[in-house]
Image (cartoon, rainbow, N blue to C red):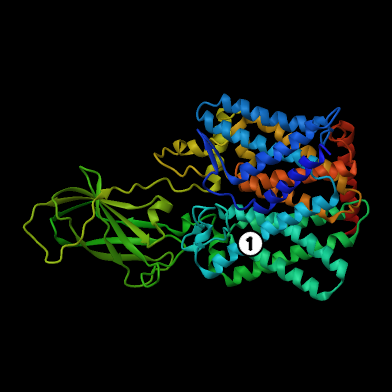
Amino acid sequence: MIQSTPRQIGYALLLLLALTLPFELDRPLLAVGPLAVTNLELLLGLILLAALVMWFGGRGRPPCLPLPHRGVVLLLAAGGLFVVTAVLAPEQNGNALKASFRLLSGMALALAVPLLVQQPRQRKIVLLALLVSGLLVAGIGLLEVWLGREFGWLAPFRAGITVTGQYLRLTGPLDYANHAAMFIEVTVPLLLVAGWLWWKRVGKTAVLLLVVFALIILLQASFATLSRASFVTIGVVGAVMILLLALGERRSNEFVRPWLGLVALVGVMFILNTVGSDVFRLRFASEGDNGWYAASWQVPPQLTLAANEIQQVPITVTNDGALTWSSNRAQPIQLGGRWIQAESGLQMAEPRWPFAESIPPGERLEMKIPLRAPSNPGAYTLIWDVVHEQVTWFGEKSGVFATSSVQVLPSNNRSPFPEPETVAPAWNYSLPIPDRSTLWRLAVQLIGERPLLGIGLDNFRLGYGRLLNADSWNETIHTNNWYLEFLVGGGVLAALPFFAWLAGEGLLAWHVLRPQPNDLWLLAILAGLLAFLIHGLLDFFLLFNSTGLLFWLLIGLWWQWLKENNHPQIAQIFSLNSLWFSVASLRNSVFRLSRKV
């Protein structure tokens, strides 16, 4: 009785966490000095407290860990080593420590799950709660994209919807579209399994059609995030699950069919989106939208004008991007300028010159611009750029613009309709967001400089710009690779034991799947974790509460399944004999499959 009440409370809180994972408030609920606690962190703390009370509340020895100690110790050692490397980081120690403790809190959640979830029915309910939260992400996001506007009531949960150029990306209540994509990738196998079991139970064609329709909507939500890695991950996860089930000792089409259907649906949806969506084709052809906004210039290096004089200035501009420049649209693309006063550094005006006709990609345009000089004499810099109104200046995306040094002479000219001039601090062009290849190159460079200890977890985003000789850069950008992020942050010292633990979990999963599995929900859990591993090659999720806790919750449910089914201890999995047996078994399975093919 002493343990049952904390377990019930903890389980209820766990369900609430699963349902509200996508809905983390931007403003903390509690703030004590430098510590700020969000709604998700408060729930996490209460869950861990309930687990601790249950752990130590009983008489006698506390219950055993959900997995044998060797695997757990390896994981916790990695977490502790991330803390050590944060303390020894060359700078930004506080930020690295905060990130390391966030990682440890996720590990603690995974350990708490097997203590609070005791029955298969409870595990299934938690998975259904995750399914509901994922469907909410997809549904809210699709409505925003289809209606073409942001929902104001989502403001407490995010700064704004993610955009690529002028296009909205499905974001839902999360901060970034890629986070919504990760949620959807985990939700797809949950919906697949839930729908398949429902159809098998009732056996009605209408139910099967409803499940297929729901999967199509969910897959379209993945495509609407405009994350190329998202739909690729879903397809690869489906293919890997087919392969693993086909390599099993007792092959059964009963388990393979839903995954075959999923892969086929992904292929059909990819074709339809490629044919019917301009933005999808643009996004698929380029990593981001930086390449959409590119121009090359030929402008006079120096100009001399009298105050208020209008002079016809010849320039040549080439559309090197992916968009057609048109000034006759709701959000026009126009030639723009910025007058910067040399002495004060103030921006004096932002003139615009619309294009007379549409400029397709690759076309070169020669123009004579009616340039009007400022009213006050002096030295100026005129920045030539193209602007997509209400979206971006091209130079902000590409880092490419042109400048002319302008000397303005005194004049008695007074225009009857003086151009309005605004005085404001000069707008600085920050470093454009680097592409993945650049980020990975910088990460490898930093790993080479501090291979053992790294620079501190989560510190890459705060320092990568200096390697590019930039004065300002986007400090929310990580390496866009889970494995590089951990290596550059914690060095080999912390990252190696973490990935060794992860490899051990993979071997354990293979041991479980090699005989024919009898629990489709287990396949959904493992497929969700596999989605993290695959998408982690192109993005990073573990230090964001919503996606990070989603990963650790899945790990905890996997451990709970192992505890319930008394599968081989991870100590046995790590033994050399078992490793050799696993490799030999996998080799024999591949050989049998190749002979059948």
| SS class, disc 1 | helix
Q: Give coordinates of residue 578: x percent, y percent.
A: 89, 35
- Disc 1 residue crowd, few under 14, some 14–19, many 20+, Cα 10 Å: many
388 or 438: nearer the viewer:
388
- The residue depicted at 85 percent of the width and 48 percent of the height is 119
Q: Is residue 64 above or below residue 153?
A: above
Q: Which residue is pictured at 62% across the width and 42% down the height?
A: 42
Q: Which residue is mark 1?
A: 138
Question: From what the image shows, is residue 230 above or below residue 277?
Answer: above
Q: Quadrant of residue 548?
A: top right
Place of residue 233 in the rendered image (x, y in percent of width and height, measured from the top left): 68, 55
Left or right: residue 577 versus residue 45 is right
The foreground one among 287 and 22 is 22
Measuring from the top left, give residue 496's x and y in whole percent. 69, 32
Q: Quadrant of the N terminus?
A: top right
Q: Nearer the viewer, residue 274 or 477?
A: 477
On the question of residue 493 being in view, the answer is no
Residue sticking out furthest to the left:
412
At 38% from the left edge and 53% from the top edge, which residue is drawn? 395
Viewport quadrant of the C terminus: bottom right
